[in-house]
Image: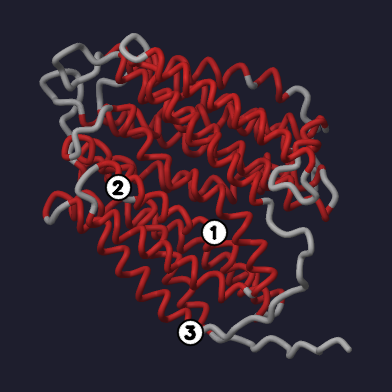
Amino acid sequence: MTATLAPPVHIGKAAVGALGMLAVATGALESVVTPTLPLLQRELDMSPAEGALLSIMLLITGALVTPIAGKFGDRYGGKRVLIRLMAVVSAGGLVSALAPNLPVLLLGQVLQGAMVGALPLSFILVRTHLPAGESKVAIGVVSGLFVGGGMAGTLSAGPVAEELSRHWMFALPTIAVIGATLLVNRLMPHDPPGRSDESGVDWPGLALLSGTLVTLMLVLALAPDIGSQPLVLGALILVLAAFVTGWIAVERRAAAPMVDLRMLARPAMWTSCVLTFVVCVGTSVPVYLVPQLFAVPADEYGFGAGATEIGFFLLPGAIAASLAGPIGGIGARRFGSRAVVTAGIVIMVAALIALAAVHTEVWHLVIGKAMIALANGLCVTAMVTSTATSVEPSETGIASSLVLVTRVVGYAVGAQVSGAILTAGTPSGSDVPAESAFVTGFVIAGAVTALSLLVTRTMSKGVKS
């Protein structure tokens, strides 16, 4: 006899507000590293390559956790999984706040990466407890508040780190996460678990993908020192090859793979993944290089900006990124996905080449970074739309996870290559990279991104409304 599940309890504005507060807090905690990365590198004596590794650890964990969080949320209930996930995030924030050195801070960032699964779980709760019309509004509110939290974190991290300490810039948003989680636990009713998924979680695939990403980052981080430790780098390359081979073998045989590699054979999917990778590489290079260039001493060729100033300089880029989603969605419906992706790539290439040629004034970097953020948002929105309409509804989750992993790899490779370029371009006995290292990074990113225009020709135009 099958038990009848009770209908979900309708929630009010207070519960949605608690989810919104949690979105603000997690968005702020996620964004504190970027504007303060030069400060963290100085205080923890990090090389540029190590700084790049720190900047992407949260993203890597998020890519691995998000599909599992969604699956568990459907199976056991969104609230139950969300509360446990936030406990991990809170622990990570406290570890980051107390970290005395880089290894401990990296551990804190790994734990904090679980926050990336919070938004999908919040959407599960909203869709469960609200009618369709109200749920769309609530999802938009929660998403917007997450972006707003990111902007708040970008602006506040510098002043907090400079006036108090780097420890407090992690501690304050972590306290907010803990408070918001307690409110969600109190105000949000439990949602009924869904049907049990007999396929389970692809744990072997998850473990091998984790090993692949971490080893890849270590290889890129050590690449500038190949002359001093070639054996270590060679051994890591062999380990990386073993992880990749094992992961491909496991994913091809898994009943419910984390990433269905067979989908890559479809033209629409491999096109989307190639473009996603290239666009994310092109975006992550200036995301890493621009704050570093702001922080270069003014008596060299930079601006000597502190963490507070860097946060203000990066704010227009954050605003442009938040506007890019709606603009990209409207453009994809009106002109088709291919046109929007092409326009975004052209804007990004122009901005990267302009940054390589002209970066002697603050406004050069501010405008260039904002244009790249806008272009990235246009491309990502259009490609998500294109991907979603190119697969069957039942395959949307698998296709999304494939694109998600590709995005993470693109961002990680771009950031680590940028760090490696700066490390290799830093003269012996100096802490300041040569200006040519920044130029090289922008030019390489622009050239790689420009090559993706050859791939956009194979995209379908997209459905016009």
Is residue 227 toward the left or the right of residue 187 in the image?
left
Q: Which of disc 2 and disc 1 is earlier in sequence?
A: 2
Question: What is the C-alpha distance between the residues marked 1 and 3?
Answer: 22 Å
Image coordinates of residue 127 in percent, x first then y, are 67, 73
Q: How many marks?
A: 3
Q: Residues within 10 Å of mark 1 (few under 14, many from 20)?
A: many
User: Disc 1 vs disc 2: which is toward the camera?
Assistant: 2
Asked whether disc 1 touches disc 3, contact meaning CB atoms under 8 Å apart, the reply is no
- Circle 1 sits on which residue? 117
Please determine whether, in this image, residue 445 is positioned above or below residue 33: above
Q: How is the image coloured?
A: secondary structure
Furthest-right residue in view? 1
Residue 363, numbered circle: none
Identify the residue at horizontal 57%, vertical 86% (top origin): 189
The mark that comes first in sequence, 3 or 2, is 3
Would residue 376 be seen by someone viewing this image from the given angle? no
Q: Which residue is mark 2?
A: 105
Q: Residues within 10 Å of mark 2 (few under 14, many from 20)?
A: many
Amino acid type at mark 2:
Leu
Residue for point 61% across, 44% down: 404
Q: Secondary structure at mark 1?
A: helix
Q: Nearer the viewer, residue 438 or 216?
A: 216
Which residue, given by chain and number where applicable, does mark 3 sit on? Answer: 14
Given this view, does label 1 or label 3 mark the residue nearer the observer? 1
Residue 330 in the image: x percent, y percent?
A: 66, 48
